[in-house]
Amino acid sequence: METPSPSFARVLPSRAIPLFLLPFLLVVIYLVVFSNDFKLHEVFGSSACNNGTTTSVQLADAYTAKPPVDLRVFLGVVTRPDFYERRALLRLAYSLQPPPARAVIDVRFVFCNLDKEEDRVLVALEIIAHDDILVLNCTENMDGGKTYEYFSTIPRLFADEPYDYVGKTDDDTYYRLAALADTLRNKPRHDLYHGFLTPCHQNLAWQYMSGMGYIVSWDIAAWISATEELRNDHDGWEDAVFAGWLRKGGRFKNVYGEEPRMYDYLDREMPDGVICFRHELMADTVAVHKLKDRLKWARTLKFFNATQGFKPSKMYHVDLYNLYRV
């Protein structure tokens, strides 16, 4: 009769194994049986010194990691405290834009001190809800030093974490942030002055960047902040005066006009039609200016596909395509 092979229990000594040794014995047996396919670090987890071994968590992080940011812009929308509807529209318009690749563009609303009781309360609510407002220490004005106050304040506020560029724009301008990032990425990061040069087709020595929006490199903003005598130098249109500062200070060097990608909105009722700074909406736009009413904003946002995320629903019946034509 065939002798049965000894069971695992029979090869063990007859004396009982102490319970505290049992876990270690099981690990030794497992290593002997599966020695070719098993590694200790796979049981106890990978350490910091894993000799090049990549964990599944590291692989997941590699696939989901965003590319590093190589461009940072502070873009201030110059407006007034009581323009609540305009700020709400701009927040909505910018929040629906796809984020620019490898860039951070912080859009903030800029105005002077709050003099009215209702503004102090309602703007405080906006700040709590959105945290996107910069209140300068000045009296509200158009050509009385607000531009100086803005550009001199930013370097002091962000001295520990400077931006690459600082921009100023009107609240009737719509910047396309990805296009702006692309056009700035390969530009110089010193003595840069970027925007729409006006008057059109004139000698560069007499031109300045239109108030629709312009960008300067961080070193220019820091120079303005450190040059106190500019504070009271605002005799005339501030945007033209600003260019005069750069010329007098020897900073009017890397000047880049972005026409025709920056322009005024073309209203078909305008008698003079298309001119050097005003034309039809175009696909590779950087900024559109003179969006003075809701209809102009609606047509502009529709042209740039801001409504592409709109989904049909039984909750509403909205026809986006036959209400108007662009």
Image (cartoon, rainbow, N blue to C red):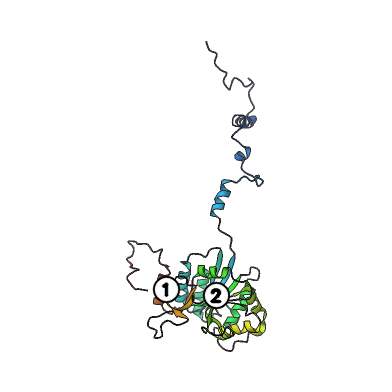
**Residue type at tag 1:** Thr
Judge left or right: residue 127 versus residue 161: left
Farthest residue to the bottom: give it: 235
Crowdedness near tag 1: few (<14), some (14–19) or many (≥20) residues, C-alpha within 10 Å:
some
Dot 2: few (<14), some (14–19), or many (≥20) neighbours within 10 Å?
A: many
The percent position of residue 112, horizontal first and vertical second, equals 56, 80
Q: How many numbered badges does the structure rendering display?
A: 2
Q: On the rendered structure, is 306 left or right of 180? A: left
- Mark 2 secondary-structure assignment: strand
Q: Amino acid at mark 2?
A: Gly
Q: Is residue 172 visible?
A: no
The one nearer the camera, 261 or 37, is 261
Return the residue at label 1. Answer: 300
Residue 76 disc label: 2
Residue 272: x %, y % from top left: 41, 85
- In the rendered view, does 281 fall on the left or right side of 200? left
First in sequence, mark 1 or 2: give its number: 2
Residue 259, image x, y percentages: 51, 77
Nearer to me, 252 or 77? 252
Q: In screen coordinates, is 126 left or right of 51?
A: left
Query: Where 44 sits versus 195, above or below?
Result: above
Query: x and y percent of residue 294 in the render?
Result: 40, 76
Residue 148 shows which numbered tag?
none
Instruction: Please indicate, yes or no, whether residue 176 appears anywhere in the rendered image.
Output: yes
Q: Which of the 4 quarters of the picture holds residue 29?
A: top right
How far is disc 1 from disc 2 in space, using C-alphas? 21 Å
Quadrant of the drawing holding the C terminus? bottom left
Q: Is residue 3 above or below residue 64?
A: above
User: Which circle, 1 or 2, is nearer the viewer?
Assistant: 1
Which residue is found at the position 53% from the left and 63% from the top? 101
